[in-house]
Amino acid sequence: MSDNDLLQRFLFERWPVRGHFVRLNASWRAVIEHHAYPEPVREVLGEAMAATVLLAGSLKFEGLLTLQMQGPGPLHLLVAQCTHRKAIRAVARHREAVVVPGSLAELTGGGQVTVTIENEDRSNRYQGMVPMEREHLAGCLEHYLERSEQVPSKLIVASDGTSAAGLLLQRMPAGSSASAESDPHAEAEAAEEWRRLELLASTLKPEELLGLPLTTILHRLFHEDDVRLFEGAPVFFQCTCSRERVEGILRSLGHEEVGDIIQERGSVEVRCEFCNRAYQYDAVDAATLFAVTVTPASREVH
Ligand SMILES: [Zn+2]
């Protein structure tokens, strides 16, 4: 299907409302292929992954957007990331072997959702937080967008073992469209239209979101409205782990501790939680890692 692993954007011609749609297939399967997540955990992870791509699509930044959920419940940590190039990765940690389905608050035990946006050169960092007190993640993120971005938003997400998908509608500030300048009647009309579109969007069923082409979804929901659909951007799985990063972790553990593990087991193995790639270090590697590098003293320049 042409909507696979694509982030798509659309606009309502008559109303100051825009939308983003994403469906992840191969990229989603790459996120979960090395993990045996219990179904309720996998479901929230898929919803979080789709929502992260939609947030990344709706915000202007060059770098990395991270959505992190942390709480004391069975699903105690979840991290989903998307770069402005639409490279994604995600991981979840759960305590119990069998996690029973429940509301978001029951699964996570409350806690918080944190959205962090970092510039590529790490020169700028923005962070926003909302409590996980709604029934679903989508409700928490609508709350987040309303509070942090001052943008009324309607978010619908769904996931299963083969796809994760989401639809985000956002009401843009009055004046961003010629139809709703400072005229109070136009403003009231735009507000009413926003409620109508929001209501229509909420009738979308998970199986429709996961399975139907976007053009069919838009036609089913908004056939009375003129919707302009833009060309989609591909979304792909890509992990940012590297030997250099792992070496940083080992250095922070210290020579003694790493040496002890090598003595006991012959080598140290560090496995990336996101992509399952294994990094191995033997005694020779460790010696190189902790070798004192002597740099010639810099000469003072006057
Ligand atoms: Zn990795």
Image (cartoon, rainbow, N blue to C red):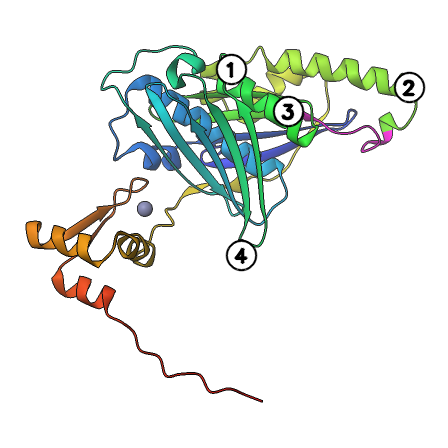
Residue type pointed to by label 4: Asp
| Magenta residues (range) | 169-178
Q: Quadrant of the C terminus?
A: bottom right
Hey, which quadrant is residue 237 in on the image?
Answer: top left
The residue labelled by disc 2 is 184
From the viewer's side, name the closer residue of 237 and 264: 264
Residue wearing tag 3:
169
Q: Are marks 4 and 1 in contact (CB under 8 Å)?
A: no
Say which of marks 4 and 3 sits in front.
Answer: 4
Mark 3 lies within 8 Å of ligand 1 (Cβ measured): no
Please tell me whether mark 1 or mark 2 is closer to you in this view: 1
Q: Which residue is mark 4?
A: 121
The span from disc 3 to disc 1 (Cα, nearest Å) is 22 Å
**How many residues crowd around disc 4 within 10 Å: few (fewer than 14), some, or many (20 or more)?**
few
Task: Tell me how far mark 2 sits from mark 3, CA to CA.
Answer: 23 Å
Q: For the point 69% across and 23% down, which residue is it?
A: 152
Looking at the rendered structure, the secondary structure element under dot 4 is: loop
Q: In front here: 37 or 129?
A: 129
Kindly identify the amino acid type of the residue bearing the numbered disc 3. Leu
Camera-side mark, 3 or 1:
1
Element type at marker 3? strand
Reading the image, the residue beneath label 1 is 133
Mark 4–mark 1 Cα distance, whole angstroms, equals: 34 Å
